[in-house]
């Protein structure tokens, strides 16, 4: 059972073709979609859960969902073995990318929101650029230089929280219904759909504007900004 997937996300493939990076993503089961009923997206709002990309693309197939569930249960039940395998796969992927003249980029929370800095020391992989979207607040998180985080706004996120996070110089991803505006809450908006490589965004505390996709197009919770 492989933990990291390469070339399975249309957006990362698009970005990889036009950049110097090659991306690997780990897809787990969000919420409580495992036999232990442990939520791997503990900060997810109702709107976020409803619009989740877990069932988008290849994720709509039961075989793919079963594989993600098995990986999640591997992480929950056999943590030490899981982390040993992840370590090996990170080294293998780094080597694979270099042989193809690319820089390795890894997104561990493809469909989860785990505090990975608690489980792996990313400074051991200086050649890899890690990045993720997260609903966890930045306070108290000890993030290595090669781990880039973009905070995700949902319907339960206060405007003051968005402003607070951007004032810290951290970018915030916001989903819009039809069109990405130039500003949101008086904060500059950068278009974020052309690539998934969020670590290439300006680190100045901007809004990363995304257009609603899949089930998010039907959102009425406020997760999507109309």
Image: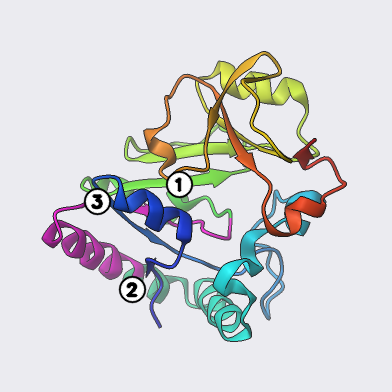
Element assignment for label 1: loop
Q: Looking at the image, which is closer to me, 138 or 63? A: 63
Indicate the secondary structure of the residue bearing disc 3.
loop
Where 5 sits versus 202, above or below? below
Q: Is mark 2 on a helix, strand or loop?
A: helix
Image spot of residue 189 (x, y percent): 58, 24
Residue that mark 2 sits on: 85
Q: How far apart are marks 2 and 3 (CA)?
A: 15 Å
Q: Among all residues in the image, which is located at the extreme bottom?
A: 63
Q: In the rendered image of this protein, does residue 96 appear above or below residue 140?
A: below
Res. 121 in view? no
Left or right for 161, reference 121: right
Q: Residue at x 60, y 78 (%)?
A: 65
Q: Which residue is drawn at the image coordinates 79% and 50% (left, top)? A: 47
For the C terminus, give its image quadrant.
top right
Give coordinates of residue 156: x percent, y percent. 80, 38
The mark lying in front, picked from 3 and 1, is 1
Please tell me whether residue 87 is drawn above or below residue 166 in the rendered image. below
The magenta segment is: 86-112
Residue extending farthest right? 220
Please give the residue where the numbered disc 1 appears in the rendered image. Answer: 196
Which dot, 2 or 1, sits closer to the camera?
1
Residue at numbered disc 3: 125
Task: Give the residue at x 58% y 68%.
Answer: 57
State the mark number for residue 102.
none
Q: Is residue 205 above or below residue 35?
A: above
The mark nearer the N terminus, 3 or 1, is 3
């Amino acid at each position: 059972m492989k933990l990291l997937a390469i070339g399975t996300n249309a957006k990362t493939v698009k970005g990889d073709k036009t950049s110097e990076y090659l991306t690997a993503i780990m897809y787990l089961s969000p919420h409580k979609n495992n036999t232990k009923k442990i939520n791997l997206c503990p900060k997810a709002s109702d709107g976020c859960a409803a619009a989740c990309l877990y069932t988008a693309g290849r994720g709509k197939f039961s075989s793919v969902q079963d594989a993600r569930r098995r990986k999640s249960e591997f992480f929950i039940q056999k943590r030490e073995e899981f982390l040993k395998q992840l370590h090996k796969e990170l080294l293998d992927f780094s080597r694979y990318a270099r042989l193809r003249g690319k820089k390795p980029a890894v997104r561990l929370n493809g469909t989860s929101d785990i505090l990975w800095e608690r489980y792996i020391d990313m400074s051991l992989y200086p050649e890899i650029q890690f990045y993720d979207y997260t609903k966890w607040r930045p306070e108290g998180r000890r993030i290595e230089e090669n781990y880039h985080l973009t905070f995700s706004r949902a319907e339960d996120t206060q405007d003051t929280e968005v402003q607070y996070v951007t004032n810290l110089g951290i970018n915030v991803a916001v989903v819009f219904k039809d069109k990405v505006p130039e500003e949101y809450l008086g904060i500059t908006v950068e278009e974020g759909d052309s690539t998934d490589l969020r670590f290439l965004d300006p680190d100045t505390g901007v809004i990363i504007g995304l257009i609603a996709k899949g089930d998010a197009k039907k959102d009425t919770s406020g997760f999507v900004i109309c």
